[in-house]
Image (cartoon, rainbow, N blue to C red):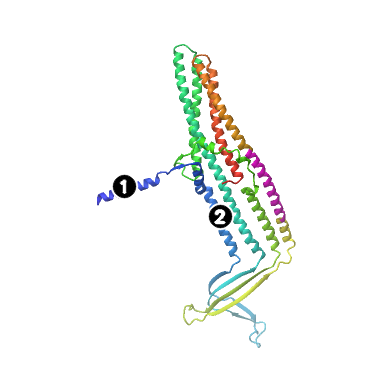
């Protein structure tokens, strides 16, 4: 029995420990996007906005459907409210100047009933039904816009992590190569074959590499946590990226992509501007509908009972039934031109929305042209940086040979090294730029 208890204790402890341990994740770029579109915090709340809008739509619909309410009231009179009449109201022979006092009611009373109300016609209700659909469409568009923004965010964050990882690999390689060169140079200096300045120049370059390496490692940690946050996972969870920077770059090289046409109506910002115009149009219809009459009906049914003692639960107590039906017609006649002023304001707002839609259309066309140009430039920049890197590697290698053989100064060698390091970073950045610029272009054309 004791052994079973010990085993049970360790089993529970292991389960709890497993629950506390952060999860491990491994994503390709597309898998990261898919995960974020389900678990990102903004996406989750965007889905909730849609659910809330659906409930709001039903709330508006229900306002025109039958409404039933029930009521129960109990009243106990400790002292009656007295009413006064002339002294001879009940006694013609009495003094007309006297005041007779009397009370209506009983010591206790109970009233219970049901009320059914039904809206028969109201112009504003019809407009409200139309507006509720537009309201829901607005949040559906907002959700789609959130998805596009999250997709672009993940692409950028994923690329930043890959950039930091590749930068660390290159910096460590540069550090190893320069450390060996520095060690050889120090031995040459000890033999008195070169000046101390050559050693010091290499030490400065190595110190700069070490500093950049430390900083890049910190940037990698921050970039990784930013990606985890965008994915909607714990920032302390273990995350591995399946894709490599060079393979992603090649998959995003598509010169024909930027040459495809742009349908502005498919852009989510244009759709939201159209939705906004519809809202303003409905607001104008709402103000106009307020000049129409409204018609409603109400049916009441219930029972009441009276007594000087609390005997309402006795079988002999008498309950009095009542019922009635009422119809009300409300006709707006004159509002001192207040309704006209509100209608004119709504009309102006509608005209502004139409202008904003035109502005959005032109602005999106301009953004598309800019995004297309930037994507095309990123492809050109990638080709140039790749060529420049190859040249910088050859120049650095030649300068290293000359420096080792004493045919070149440490300054020339260091300059070649700096040129190589800059070309390496430019090459890595050009690959990230292709991925990011294509993501920005896809966002404008609303490509999922």
Q: Which of 198 and 298 lies nearest the eye of the viewer?
A: 198
x then y, percent, for residue 192: 46, 11
Q: Quadrant of residue 292?
A: bottom right
Q: Is residue 410 left or right of residue 335?
A: left
The residue under label 2 is 50
Residue sticking out furthest to the front:
256
Where does the magenta region start and end?
347-372
In the picture shown, does residue 329 fall above or below 13? below
Q: Which of 336 and 94 lies nearest the eye of the viewer?
A: 336
Q: Is residue 407 left or right of residue 120?
A: left
x then y, percent, for residue 332: 71, 66
The residue under label 1 is 10
Is residue 445 in the magenta section?
no
x then y, percent, for residue 401: 50, 18
Disc 2 packing (10 Å; few <14; some 14–19; many ≥20) = many
Magenta span: predominant SS is helix
Q: Secondary structure at mark 2?
A: helix
Mark 2 to mark 1 CA distance (whole Å): 45 Å
Q: Residue at x 67, y 47 (%)?
A: 361
């Amino acid at each position: 029995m004791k052994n079973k208890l010990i085993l049970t204790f360790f089993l529970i402890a292991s389960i709890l420990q497993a629950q506390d341990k952060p999860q491990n994740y491994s994503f390709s770029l597309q898998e990261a996007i898919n995960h974020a579109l389900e678990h990102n915090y903004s996406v989750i709340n965007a889905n909730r906005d849609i659910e809330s809008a659906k409930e709001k739509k039903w709330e508006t619909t229900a306002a025109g459907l039958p409404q039933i309410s029930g009521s129960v009231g109990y009243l106990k009179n400790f002292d009656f409210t007295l009413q006064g009449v002339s002294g001879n109201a009940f006694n013609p022979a009495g003094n007309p100047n006297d005041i007779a006092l009397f009370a209506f009611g009983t010591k206790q009373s109970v009233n219970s009933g049901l009320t059914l109300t039904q809206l028969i016609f109201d112009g504003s209700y019809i407009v409200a039904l139309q507006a509720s659909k537009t309201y829901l469409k607005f949040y559906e568009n907002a959700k789609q816009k959130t998805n596009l923004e999250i997709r672009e965010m993940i692409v950028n964050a994923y690329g930043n992590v890959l950039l930091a990882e590749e930068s660390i690999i290159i910096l460590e390689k540069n550090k190893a190569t320069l450390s060996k060169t520095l060690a050889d140079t120090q031995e040459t200096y000890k033999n008195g074959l070169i000046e101390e300045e050559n050693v010091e120049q290499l030490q400065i370059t190595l110190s700069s590499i070490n500093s950049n390496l430390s900083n890049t490692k910190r940037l990698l940690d921050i970039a990784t946590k930013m990606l985890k946050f965008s994915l909607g996972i714990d920032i302390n969870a273990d995350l591995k990226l399946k894709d490599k920077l060079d393979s992603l770059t090649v998959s995003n090289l598509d010169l024909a992509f930027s040459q495809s046409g742009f349908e502005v109506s498919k852009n989510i910002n244009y759709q939201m501007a159209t939705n906004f115009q519809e809202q303003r149009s409905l607001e104008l219809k709402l103000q106009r509908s307020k000049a129409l009459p409204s018609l409603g009906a109400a049916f009441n049914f219930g029972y009441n009972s009276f007594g000087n003692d609390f005997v309402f639960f006795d079988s002999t107590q008498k309950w009095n039934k009542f019922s009635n039906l009422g119809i009300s017609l409300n006709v707006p006649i004159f509002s001192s031109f207040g309704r006209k002023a509100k209608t004119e304001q709504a009309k102006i707002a509608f005209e502004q929305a139409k202008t904003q839609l035109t502005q959005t259309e032109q602005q999106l066309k301009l953004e598309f042209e800019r995004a297309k140009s930037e994507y095309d430039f990123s492809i050109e920049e990638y080709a140039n940086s790749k060529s420049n890197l190859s040249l910088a590697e050859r120049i650095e290698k030649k300068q290293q040979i000359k420096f080792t053989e004493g045919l070149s100064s440490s300054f020339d060698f260091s300059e070649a090294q700096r040129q190589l390091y800059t070309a390496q970073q430019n090459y890595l950045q050009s690959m990230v730029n292709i991925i990011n610029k294509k993501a920005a272009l896809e966002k404008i054309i609303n490509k999922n």
